[in-house]
Image (cartoon, rainbow, N blue to C red):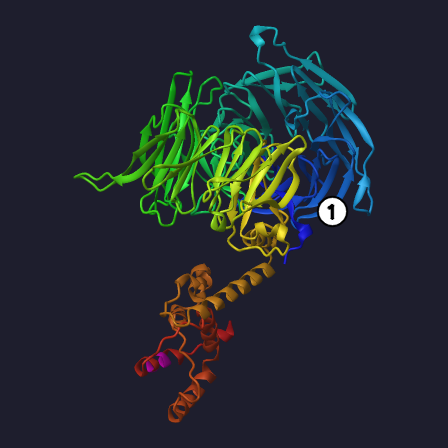
Amino acid sequence: MVEVESLRVVRCGGSELNFRRAVFSADSKYVFCVSGDFIKVYSTATEECVHILQGHRNLVTGIQLNPKNHLQLYSCSFDGMIKLWDYIDGILIKTFIVGCKLHALFTLACAEDSVFVIINKEKPDVFQLVSVKLPKSSSQEIEAKELSFVLDYINQSPKCIAFGNEGEYVAAVRDFYLSVYFFKKKTTSRFTLSSSRNKKHAKNNFTCVACHPKENCIATGHGDGKIRLWRNFDDEKKYTYTCLHWHHDLVMDLAFSVTGSSLLSGGRESVLVEWREAAEKNKEFLPRLGATIEHISVSPAGDLFCTSHSDNKMIIIHRNLEASAVIQGLVKDRNIFTGLMIDPRTKALVLNGKPGHLQFYSLQSDKQLYNLDITQQEYINDYGLIQIELTKAAFGCYGNWLATVEQRQEKETELELQMKLWTYNKKTQGFVLNTKVNMPHEDHITALCFCNAEKSENPTLVTTSKDGHFKVWILTDDSDIYKKAVGWTCDFVGSYHKYQATNCCFSEDGSLLAVSFEEIVTIWDSETWELKCTFCQRAGKIRHLCFGRLTCSKYLLGATENGILCCWNLLSCALEWSAKLNVRVMEPDPNSENIAAISQSSMGSDLFVFRPSEPRPLYIQKNISREEVQWGVFVPRDVPESFTSEAYQWLNRSQFYFLTKSQSLLTFSTQSPEEKLTPTSKQLLAEETLPTTPFYFILGKHRQQQQDDKLNEALKNELVQLPLTENIPAISELLHTPAHVLPSASFLCSMFVNSLLLSKETKSAEEIPDDVSMEEEKESVDSDEENNFTEKVQDTNNTDLGKDIIHQLSKSEEKELRKFRKVDYSWITAL
């Protein structure tokens, strides 16, 4: 049973993976990234999330490996704390309380018991780089109040701070200024570029900085796409710099390789550029990475790179500039027009993704499954260009059909509108375009919905528009002499006094269609498309509309823009009840009568769960989010929960997810993010942490043998299969042993034939006749005495072949085998 007190609002996904640079482990097996107030640990080989480090109370702003222990990780946050983690076990070791907002974190091997952080002074736009002394103590929480000033007037972004030449100096850039602080001299050099007042140098402001790990060389990125390499900067008069130029737009990030032999750069071109030996001619490219490169990281071993992109993904790249893994989070689009939907087939969350795409996002693994290209046009990254936008989408017929609407409008009179119907193809396991309708309405489409009733014979789709009409689309036979096909066509057009149609929905059994026309709700018969009744409360334009389900299917709910929630009884055609509630989200649970409504107030967003049959809520929770909640959806559970409290039983069959204005995905749960990790991820972490020692190989063989035993039990009654040759030890020894130490070919031949023999099934004493068993026992005495070594080899091979391999030999075959068993092997004892 689940305790009542354990239910809480948790962030289940959607946080930015590209907020800060990723960090590799020392052995390059793991990559760490900040994700909201969590730190996620991913496997670089399998892309699986193996740990979620949680403990910060606010946004995590920096992570770095502990230079004294590469199995530990430092993190800092806006909560004013620095935490030390054991990332292998996911354990918090220590917490250092600094007390002020921390914007970035840096560590140095030469700095004993100290880390560097960026803090904010009294003025909001003035930041400082300071050193924090981490005191030694046995307690888990320690106050770290000893701060030492390093640099002033810096940028809060960690991309604008870099340490060089093994910690001899630190460089910081902001606007048109470069500052270099030397730790030994305790002096600061400052360099200035021409300001933006000069049109020739309008975009040469600093955007990022990187320092050579072993030389006095600083690389800076600029808004005009140039990279400047600074040398002799210890003298403010004799300094020099050279320029590298390939990027057409601002340089987003720079990173030197571990040895410093090459420089990596990235920007809005979605191309990773490697400058070999910092020369203009020696360039290598990794193009078509999909989105703007925000950050670049290099592993301590130097064998892997990691790029973080604006579409909330990370790409693991080998040293030879080949992408090996992609870790994709929830894509943050500018606007979520489609709302939150659930794919009935994969149970994936579906919403706007990349421009012109629908993204299918796994809620269980917190990663993207795939993208569906709806507009099927190349995206041009130009801020002044008006793009085609995907505005509406809906699933129908248990995931067999998908309807999408896309639009583009440059002027008020130039509306481009297109509706597409996609069918699910079982062979390709994806959606294929079936019907494309140009200008299905004369104005913007406001809503669309499928009739998902179980008894529905013909798929039906309804669209509503600001042109004052709603249209009914049905699937018809579109076959010709060449092929059989089906397509969608308009079957009915309805309107009500030229009011704009704003919402539509079908009843659970599909017999009724509700369409709202501004302040009026109309009910239509889905068989004849006759108008049955209307509801008009004059409480404002209808914002949300939905039918009750199961025992509450006789009710219709509507939420207005004036903050009124109405419930109508369809049997009496009268208003059942109304409540004053500013509903922003209203979602029915497909597995129960419950309906979740989220209202917006000055204090935040509040949740109300109720049934249409009574106005009293089953559950109320205030301030589920400080910001506005824009969308919500119920997701059916694979395994029902067992909440005992009546207030929480609405979560037994389905889980409720909601999306905030900043596109954070939240839900109600009883488990922490670490507990929600799949068992396969835990097993993966355990296996990867085992050292490659002789004991590891013994343990691995033991695990494999246990798996084989389970498989043998399951296949007892299956047909006999011959073993693969690579699993036979005799063949492995023959192929891997040097030729000059192998015994004679006659011996190898007999051993090879013996290894191919299948073990005979042992029978019980009752099944074997006495005379046969006595004869076999007598014959085997001589053979056992003189062929003891051969029997040992035979037994080993039989064990490896498995007990489930059974083959009945004839008497002639047994006699032939006995001849091989009498071969003299006594010569081997002299070796």
Does the image show residue 129? yes
Residue extent of the magenta highlight = 815-819
Disc 1: CA contacts within 10 A as few (<14), some (14-19) or many (>=20)? some
Judging depth in this view, the residue of 616 and 699 nearest the camera is 616
Q: Is residue 780 above or below residue 700?
A: below
For the question of whether residue 356 can be seen, the reply is: no
Q: Nearer the viewer, residue 739 or 411?
A: 411
Dominant secondary structure (helix, strand or loop) of the stretch shown in magenta: helix
Q: Quadrant of residue 56?
A: top right
Q: Which residue is mark 1?
A: 93
Look at the image and say whether residue 49 sits in the magenta stretch. Answer: no
Residue 823 % position (x, y): 40, 78
799 left or right of 204?
A: left
Q: Could you tell me residue 298's position as x and y percent? A: 59, 35
In the image, 478: left or right of 240?
Answer: left
Q: How many labels were placed on the picture?
A: 1
| Residue 767 sits above or below residue 623 on the image | below
The amino acid type of the residue labelled 1 equals Ile
Comparing 341 with 675, the one in front is: 341
Under tag 1, what secondary structure?
strand
Instruction: In the displayed orientation, state which residue is furthest to the bottom.
Output: 771
Above/below status of 190 relative to 167: above
Query: Camera-side residue: 335 or 793?
Result: 335
Which quarter of the rendered picture does the N terminus lie within? bottom right
Q: Indicate the position of residue 397 as horizontal and vertical percent values.
A: 37, 45
Residue sticking out furthest to the left: 481
- Name the image quarter holding residue 112: top right
Residue 110 position, x and y percent, is 74, 35
Report the residue at 46% width, 70% height from top. Answer: 713
